[in-house]
Image (tube, helix red, strand yellow):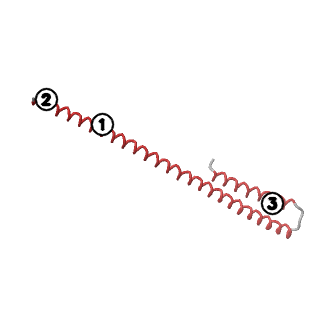
Amino acid sequence: MSNQKKGKDLLIGAVVGGVLGAATALLLAPKSGRELRRDIAEQAQVVSDKTVQIASTITQKTQDVAKTVSTHTVELVGKAKETASSVVETVRSWKEAKADDELVDEIAASGAAEDLVIVGNR
């Protein structure tokens, strides 16, 4: 389950639990209508404040996770580039070594051919 979904579920649970708890406490307490309305308004404000606080905490944690993922992604891309460069250099060195071997073989063959021509002219 993703962190974003967990945070969203936590926020929804906190809001619903807060509202239900506050409503239950207010409705079961023996108070006059004016006191009850004032208490409901106060509890609604408390729930609203808690919701804002939880939302900001989740936002901060989500941003922290995004930064961490971004940092790891940059590191992985750098390692991939280094590995690719290493592979390219290795292949180039193989090609150069093969080209050098072919050149040596060509020079040796050329030298052998010259020796044959010299021997044949005698």
Question: Residue 5 at what x, y percent from top left?
Answer: 64, 52
The three-letter code of the residue at mark 2 reads Val
- Crowding near pointer 2: few (<14 within 10 Å), some, many (20+)? few
Q: Nearer the viewer, residue 103 or 1?
A: 103
Spatial CA distance of label 3 from label 2 is: 113 Å
Give the side of residue 70 with respect to residue 92, left or right: right
Give the side of residue 25 with respect to residue 64, left or right: right
At 56% from the left and 51% from the top, the residue drawn is 72
- Crowding near pointer 3: few (<14 within 10 Å), some, many (20+)? some
At 88% from the left and 68% from the top, the residue drawn is 32
Q: Which residue is mark 1?
A: 101
The three-letter code of the residue at mark 3 reads Ala
Secondary element under disc 1, as helix, strand or loop, is: helix
- Crowding near pointer 1: few (<14 within 10 Å), some, many (20+)? few
Quarter of the view holding residue 116: top left
Q: Nearer the viewer, residue 29 or 94?
A: 94
Secondary element under disc 2, as helix, strand or loop, is: helix
Secondary element under disc 3, as helix, strand or loop, is: helix
Question: Residue 65 at what x, y percent from top left?
Answer: 62, 54
Question: Residue 15 at what x, y percent from top left?
Answer: 73, 58
Kindly identify which numbered label has been placed on residue 22.
3
> In the current view of this chain or complex, which residue is farthest to the front?
122
Q: Quadrant of the C terminus?
A: top left
**Dot placed on the residue nearer the N-terminal end, 1 or 2:** 1
Image vertical order of residue 90 relative to residue 114, above or below: below
Q: Are marks 3 and 1 in contact (CB under 8 Å)?
A: no
**Dot placed on the residue nearer the N-terminal end, 3 or 1:** 3
Spatial CA distance of label 3 from label 1 is: 86 Å
Q: Which residue is mark 2?
A: 119
At 88% from the left and 61% from the top, the residue drawn is 29
Q: Nearer the viewer, residue 69 or 43?
A: 69
Give the side of residue 82 with respect to residue 5, left or right: left
